[in-house]
Image: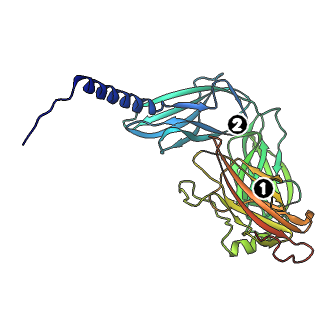
Amino acid sequence: MFSNKTLPTAVVLALGMLFFLANAMAVKAAEPNGIIRPSEGGIVSGLIPVTGVADEPDFLAWQLDLLPLAEPETAIFVQRGETRHPVLGRIGSLDTALYPNGEYRLRLRVIRKDGNYSEYLSTILIDNGPLGSNRITDPLDGTALACLTSVRGIAHAPDFRNWQLDLLPGGVEDKSVMLARGSQPRFSQGNLTEFDTTPFPDGNHLLRLRVVHLDGNYDQYYTPVAINNSILAAALSLNACSCARANSDVVSAEPNMLTYPLNAMTVRGVVPVCGKADDPNFQAWQVDLLFDGDENTSVLIAHGETSTVAKAPLMLFDTSALPDGKYGLRLRVGRLDETIDSHTILLCVANNGVTANCASR
């Protein structure tokens, strides 16, 4: 038997209202394209994340450019990507050390497959502080290096052509190996390059920074360093650390964690601390030393604003100044939404002998 029933008018109206509200909420959930951070009128310095939304139904790519207010027709390319960002999060980054102090417009273009685009602007003030003198700022003189090593510095001139960074094995000028070259000046300390020390022999070497002028002449600056790859030998043999540069396009499924030292390990001398610290909304990482393994008794020993996905050394930890005993290491990875990942290991420092089981839980 077939029966055709009609819903009461009030029920129909109520259902219609629910349908309308559901659609309205769905529309509201689609966040508008634009730059959220740095905010309009913000004062920025260093390597800063650019957060916002970049998405279109026919999305092709996004692009960040910097436009000096004094030269509005000049656009300086910053970064481009082909991954859509439909919700608020980190789109890219801006290294202010590449640009002179002053006012700029940061421009986000969201490009569609037909070649058209929408663009969004945020006016910012770059303030890198007083103009620094040319030099290698990191590593410091005499620093022991192992594995992936970041070299930071300042390199600029009124008639700037380029800069070049070389390693001089044994300090010998005619055996120099070029590590990096750049055509953009560095007005404040920033990353010049990252290089792997393992192809070079252990021993004393020189880093040389040349700042080349338009006429071909140059100024040069030296920093003595000591390569000691033996520090990483044990960690590399266990595949707990890596000296390889990670492919930034590959998303690692591994959680943020310390990979070396191993939990409950006995350590002495200088020890590499390796791990993964990465997230789509990555902000920073830090490593804390925990006295007696106590989470509530800690001191910051390393901090970074660059993510790492390849189990690269986060720091070289010199345990020689610590009394023998039980300690902990804690890695915290912070996101832009102020949430964190945390991973803790225990270890035993035994520079004056073997202290059995002091790091056991």
For this view, does 310 lie left or right of residue 25? right
Give the Cα distance between marks 1 and 2: 36 Å
Say above or below: 184 vs 130. Answer: below
Residue occupied by mark 1: 295
Residue 322 position by quadrant: bottom right
Query: Which type of secondary structure does the marked residue at label 1 adopt?
Result: loop
Residue at 58% across, 61% down: 254
Q: Which mark is residue 96?
A: 2
Residue at 70% across, 37% down: 96
Farthest residue toward the front?
1
Q: Given the image, on which type of amino acid does mark 1 rest?
A: Glu
Position of the C terminus, as image quadrant, is bottom right
Crowding near the residue tagged with mark 2, few <14, some 14–19, many ≥20 C-alpha atoms within 10 Å = many
Mark in the foreground, 1 or 2: 1
Say above or below: 53 vs 274. Answer: above
Q: Given the image, on which type of amino acid does mark 2 rest?
A: Thr
Residue at 82% across, 34% down: 131
Query: Which type of secondary structure does the marked residue at label 2 adopt?
Result: helix
Foreground: 181 or 238? 238
First along the sequence among labels 1 and 2: 2
Residue 202 x, y percent position in the rendering: 81, 71
Position of the N terminus, as image quadrant, is top left
Crowding near the residue tagged with mark 1, few <14, some 14–19, many ≥20 C-alpha atoms within 10 Å = some
Residue at 57% across, 24% down: 73
Residue 241 x, y percent position in the rendering: 69, 67
Q: Is residue 203 visible?
A: no
Foreground: 335 or 199? 335
Say above or below: 315 vs 30. Answer: below
Residue 54 x, y percent position in the rendering: 49, 36
* C-beta proximity under 8 Å, tags 1 and 2: no
Q: Is residue 267 visible?
A: yes
Residue 5 x, y percent position in the rendering: 14, 32
